[in-house]
Image: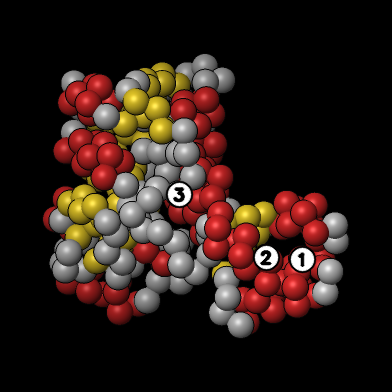
Amino acid sequence: MLVAERQQKIVELVNERKSIRVSELSRIFSVTEETIRRDLEKLEAEQKLSRSHGGAVSLTPDESNELSFSEREITNVKEKKEIALEAVKHVIEGDKIMLDASTTAWYMAKALPDIPITVLTNSIKVAMELSSRKEVTVISTGGTLLSKSLSYVGPLAESSLETYHVNKAFISCKGLHLEKGISESDEQQARIKKKMMDNADSVFIMIDHSKFGVRAFSWLDGLEAIDHIITDGKVDPAIVQQLADRSLKTIKV
């Protein structure tokens, strides 16, 4: 197969699947991972896709559909892990917290110390990660399982959240717009996250720099519902100042 043909097929695969790993492309085309990385570098320079940690993602994702956990898992990994580590610093012994089904929340769960806290979540990945911690009490919402995100949604999940009150909710979202508030790509996830925010004393929004200025499919809440924003160092300083003007504390890592 010619190089140009392989690269064209890579673009087609990325656009079809929305994201794909280097290791998988290496197996598909029977070339080394280093060759695939060079292909991705060239294709990114031509603005045909975007490279991510361990793979590539489409430049034209479908905002109306929720990405799978594995697809989100390879996007902005470094930033998400840094944000998660900062979020953990805001959890103390005795806290009762809510974690959503985002990959950032999963990274946060992986970093949580084994101390007496209660974690309420709609994420199977988060619940499984915390299952071995002897001091951590884990409560799962139950509900309708979404196989792509490995999370529970629907009336049962929403009603279970209404019966609890927590100190802190740690939430990620698809977009934060200075005028239109925060939004999510999936309506059912937006409803769950809204319930989590409504039943927490403090709301921490965990988003990387790429989420600012974005309006996704389903509106979640206004900026007034947020107490803290944890983001990475790549965020525009002008945006941080505009948030400060709205009395929103932004923590950059």
Mark 2 vs 1, N-terminal side: 2
Q: Give the Cα separation between the discs numbered 2 and 3.
A: 19 Å
Q: Residue 137, position in %: x, y?
A: 41, 19
Of the 4 image quadrants, the one containing the N terminus is bottom right
Q: Element type at marker 1?
A: helix
Choose mark 2 or mark 3, whichever is in front. Answer: 2
Find residue 36 and name its label.
1
Q: Element type at marker 2?
A: helix
**Which amino acid type is marked by label 1?**
Ile
Mark 1 neighbour class, 10 Å CA radius: few under 14, some 14 to 19, many 20 or more: many
Q: Element type at marker 3?
A: loop
Q: Residue 15, position in %: x, y?
A: 55, 63
Q: Residue 223, position in %: x, y?
A: 18, 58
Tell me where residue 224 sits by quadrant: bottom left
Which residue is painted at 35% across and 77% down in the image? 237
Tags 2 and 1 touching, CB below 8 Å: yes
Which residue is painted at 25% across and 22% down in the image? 156
Find residue 10 and name its label.
2
Q: Is residue 75 visible?
A: no
Mark 1 vs 3, N-terminal side: 1
Mark 2 vs 3, N-terminal side: 2
The vertical placement of 93 against 104, above or below, is above
**Which amino acid type is marked by label 3?**
Leu
For this orientation, the residue located farthest to the bottom is 46
Mark 2 neighbour class, 10 Å CA radius: few under 14, some 14 to 19, many 20 or more: many
Q: Give the Cα separation between the discs numbered 2 and 1.
A: 9 Å
Q: Which residue is mark 3?
A: 67
